[in-house]
Amino acid sequence: MELAIVFVIVLLIFGPKRLPGLGRQLGTGMREFKESITGKGGRDEDDEDYREDRHKVESALGRPEGEKAPLADEPVAREKSQL
């Protein structure tokens, strides 16, 4: 009974046209969360494709070869002198 009440409220708020999209987004979000928790589907730095992609990005940015600069999805480690 409670589930039916929640469904009716959601239907009134979002409308029937947006419900399939919301369900799809919810499912995708839950799947990504599950993969991040279990560690599946993540990128491994030892992976050859990852190293090739990183090399392409660094060369496109004009960085000297071997310079380790973080990409957009990597955390930046600051030295004590920069703090």
Image (tube, rainbow, N blue to C red):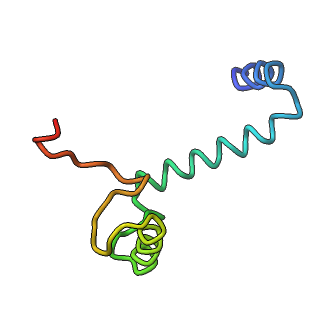
Could you tell me which residue is drawn at 73 percent across and 37 percent down? 22
User: Can you say which quadrant of the picture contains the N terminus?
Assistant: top right
48 relative to 16 in the view: left or right: left
Q: Residue at x 37, y 69 (%)?
A: 44
Percent across and percent down for residue 34 are 49, 51
Q: Residue furthest right?
A: 17
Q: Give the x, y percent position of residue 7.
A: 76, 26
Note whether 28 is above or below 12 in the view shown.
below
Q: Residue at x 41, y 74 (%)?
A: 55
- Residue 13 drawn at (x, y percent): 79, 19
Height in image: 68 above or below 16? below
In which image quadrant can residue 69 be found?
A: bottom left
Please state which of residues 59 and 21 is positioned toward the viewer in this rendering: 59
> What residue is rendered at 77% in x and 18% in y?
9
Residue 6 picture quarter: top right
Q: Looking at the picture, how far across and down is residue 36, in whole percent?
A: 44, 53
Q: Nearer the viewer, residue 74 or 63?
A: 63
Query: From the viewer's perspective, is 27 left or right of 18?
Result: left
Residue found at the far left of this picture: 81
Left-right relation of 57 to 31:
left
47 or 64: nearer the eye?
64
User: Which quadrant: the C terminus?
Assistant: top left
Identify whether 19 is placed above or below 61: above
Residue 41 vs residue 46, the one in the foreground: 46
